[in-house]
Image (tube, coloured by chain):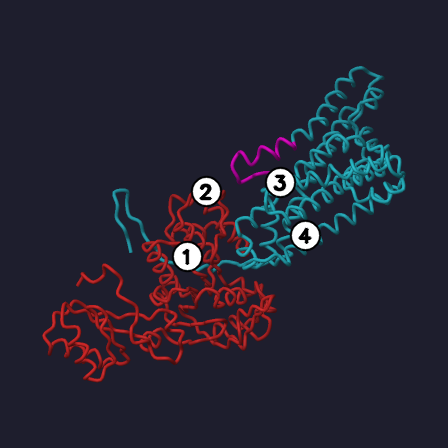
Chain colours: A cyan, B red
């Protein structure tokens, strides 16, 4: 069948059956995982979708760039450089306190996009009628969000690390001096990405309406530390000690202090004086629990 | 090996709703119409075949694969077009269908090529790069069909594919379904509550009501058993009715139209002869389909006075 027009002919070649490979479930899960990462940064969407993630990521790395710049200028001051560097408020152990809230805002902005859209527009039946299973779908999305968050969380540490190595009088000794901190900041970034990403996934999976999901995610991270601080100040330290591990914001403050051996940012976390492993365990339980409950949500969701 | 085999398939929803009630059926490849009123269990059956819903009891196999245990394998070779909206408005048809091809396990280059191919097949051209939110209902239905076809399934399950379309859109969608089934050699199951629509595309018809099988037969058997012939004359309908009854036919006058039940070809000759003998001005003869409700009234013969002729149809010859 052909149709002729002024511009030439259109040939209808008829239907061509697909004879190529069908890579099955693994391939589909991998594709959904990488698509989720791109969706977290608004890649493949319009320019407006990129504003929030890239702005937040840029603000997150800004203090690190500033710190490296100051250190580079200070290096010219000669012997005093080390003292200036140590006096800087922007260090590995203080970085979480500086930008933790940005990572939380990144979650609040992007998790509802990642989990709410498919529910709002009824796309889930199209996924679940394909080769991937419901848990596959949930895990690919959760991991996509976590990996995106990890990139934002770890980037400033890397900038600080590379900056400090090269600002040192001799990069080789600088590297030897700094290398020990790498596993520490990687672990803290993993915990931040895991716990914030897991909880944000769980909330967004239960709250298809975007605005509600965003508000709930912010509330879950902002409100508990305030309540616990009030309890610690007005009621009892023991009660605060009992519930502080249910506050994700305080837990990550505690892991940061435990990992870097520093003083917690939160007065309450410092006061209750729980051992460091308690925060690490709480973060681990929080990550596993939120991922498990997100999968469960998708196992039961009606399509 | 039948394409789809159901053995005593039953699905109960919570709160005592019975969606499927002991359905036993073998279906061979072809274009299969699944008719039933709203709530008859069509969507439930489709979703069980996809492995999206677990049957309460009974067996169901698709291509000899058990829906309970081999869902992933079945879904690799099945395309599904849901009844309701399932398209994100802020994505282009190309991006969306490509993504869905990837979700069926196609490599990324193949996914893009297949997307171009199926979008052309369903008749989406320049507009496929625009966001779906700006599409008409007809275009959205085409995207829904395209995503069901993109991984070249062996079986296509279409749930009310003409939902929300205007008459022209319905015709186009039905023609597309027919073409997909006949030219591509893909088996198709079309669920619809509109018999008049489904009989235009199907070879085989399955009627269900309240989760039970009413009838499963080639399309011809259906229309033969339920055929009503409408004979419209300018005058003399009373004489025609009397003559036809005298010659052994079950005829009823309805305005200027005489309705009669036709069960065999010989009866058409009787009608022709009666009209000729009386010398009546014949406007038209047409085959009337029963409404679904009549079809479902199983062993009761068609009622003597089928539906009234729609207004404005009586003038064309």
Q: Which residue lies at the image location 56% right of the left edge and 57% below the top edge?
A: A303
Q: Name the residue under label 2.
A: B131
Q: What element carries label 1?
A: loop
Residue at which label 3 appears: A110
| Mark 3 crowdedness (10 Å alpha carbons): few <14, some 14-19, many ≥20 | many
Q: Real-space Cα distance between discs 3 and 2?
A: 20 Å
Q: Mark 4 and mark 1 in contact? Answer it, CB < 8 Å.
A: no
Q: How far apart are marks 3 and 4 (CA)?
A: 16 Å
Q: What element carries label 2?
A: loop
Provide the residue span drawn in magenta. Answer: A41-57
Q: Which chain carries label 4?
A: A
Local secondary structure at mark 3: helix
The first of marks 1 and 2 along the sequence is 2
Residue behind mark 4: A294
**Residue A185 at x, y = what percent?**
78, 37
Q: Are marks 3 and 4 on the same chain?
A: yes
Could you say which quadrant of the image residue A170 lies in?
Answer: top right
Main secondary structure type of the part rendered in magenta: helix
Residue B109 image position (x, y, % from top left): 50, 50
Mark 4 residue crowding within 10 angstroms, few (<14) / some (14–19) / many (20+)? many
Near-viewer residue (A272 or A279)? A272
Image: A121 above or below B257? above
Q: Which mark is residue B163?
A: 1
Tell me, yes or no, whether the highlighted magenta stretch contains residue A56: yes
Q: Quadrant of the N terminus of chain A?
A: bottom left
- Are the numbered discs 4 and 2 placed on the same chain, yes or no? no
Q: Is residue A9 magenta?
A: no
Q: As drawn, is B48 to the left or to the right of A136?
A: left
Foreground label between 4 and 2: 4
């Amino acid at each position: 069948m052909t149709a002729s027009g002024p511009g030439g002919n259109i040939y209808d070649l008829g239907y061509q059956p697909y004879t190529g490979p069908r890579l099955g479930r693994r391939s589909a899960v991998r594709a959904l995982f990488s698509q989720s990462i791109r969706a977290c940064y608004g890649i493949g969407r319009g320019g407006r979708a990129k504003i929030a993630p890239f702005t937040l990521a840029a603000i997150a790395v800004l203090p690190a760039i500033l710190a490296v710049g100051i250190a580079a200028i200070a290096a010219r001051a000669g012997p005093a450089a080390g003292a200036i560097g140590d006096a800087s408020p922007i260090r590995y152990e203080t970085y979480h306190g500086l930008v933790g809230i940005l990572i939380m805002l990144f979650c609040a902005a992007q998790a509802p996009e990642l989990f709410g859209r498919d529910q709002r527009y009824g796309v889930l039946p199209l996924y679940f009628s394909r080769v991937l299973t419901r848990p596959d779908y949930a895990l690919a999305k959760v991991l996509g969000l976590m990996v995106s968050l990890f990139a934002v969380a770890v980037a400033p540490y890397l900038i600080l690390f590379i900056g400090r190595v090269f600002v040192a009088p001799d990069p080789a000794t600088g590297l030897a001096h700094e290398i020990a901190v790498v596993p520490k900041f990687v672990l803290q970034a993993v915990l931040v990405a895991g716990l914030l990403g897991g909880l944000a996934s769980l909330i967004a999976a239960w709250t298809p309406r975007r605005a509600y999901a965003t508000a709930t995610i912010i509330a879950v991270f902002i409100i508990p530390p305030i309540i616990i601080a009030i309890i610690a100040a007005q009621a009892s330290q023991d009660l605060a000690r009992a519930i502080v591990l249910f506050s994700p914001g305080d837990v990550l403050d505690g892991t940061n202090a435990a990992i870097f051996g520093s003083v917690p940012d939160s007065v309450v976390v410092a006061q209750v004086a729980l051992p460091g492993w308690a925060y690490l365990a709480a973060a681990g339980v929080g990550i596993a629990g939120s991922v498990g409950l997100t999968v469960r949500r998708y196992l039961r969701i009606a399509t | 090996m039948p394409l789809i085999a159901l053995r005593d398939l039953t699905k109960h929803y919570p709160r005592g709703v019975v969606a499927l009630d002991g359905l036993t059926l073998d279906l061979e490849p072809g274009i299969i119409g699944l008719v039933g009123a709203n709530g008859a269990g069509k969507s439930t059956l489709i979703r069980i075949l996809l492995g999206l819903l677990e049957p309460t009891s009974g067996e169901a196999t698709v291509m000899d694969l058990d829906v309970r245990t081999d869902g992933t394998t079945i879904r690799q070779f099945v395309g599904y077009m849901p009844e309701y909206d399932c398209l994100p408005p802020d994505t282009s048809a190309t991006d969306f269908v490509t993504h869905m091809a990837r979700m069926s396990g196609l490599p990324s280059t193949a996914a893009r090529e297949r997307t171009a191919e199926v979008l052309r097949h369903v008749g989406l051209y320049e507009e496929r790069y625009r966001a779906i939110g700006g599409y008409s209902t007809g275009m959205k239905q085409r995207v829904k069909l395209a995503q069901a076809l993109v991984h070249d399934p062996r079986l296509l399950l279409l749930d009310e594919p003409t939902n929300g379309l205007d008459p022209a859109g319905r015709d186009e969608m039905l023609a597309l379904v027919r073409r997909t089934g006949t030219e591509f050699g893909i088996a198709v199951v079309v669920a619809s509550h509109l018999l008049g629509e489904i009989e235009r595309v199907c070879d085989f018809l399955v009627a269900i009501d309240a989760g039970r099988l009413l009838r499963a037969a080639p399309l011809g058997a259906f229309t033969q058993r339920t055929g009503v012939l409408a004979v419209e004359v300018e005058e003399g309908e009373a004489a025609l009715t009397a003559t036809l009854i005298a010659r052994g036919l079950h005829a009823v006058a309805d305005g200027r139209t005489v309705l009669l039940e036709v069960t065999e070809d010989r009866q058409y000759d009787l009608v022709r002869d009666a009209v000729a003998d009386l010398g009546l001005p014949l406007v038209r003869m047409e085959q009337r389909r029963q409404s679904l409700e009549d079809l479902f009234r199983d062993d009761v013969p068609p009622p003597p006075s089928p539906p009234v002729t729609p207004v404005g149809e009586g003038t064309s010859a």
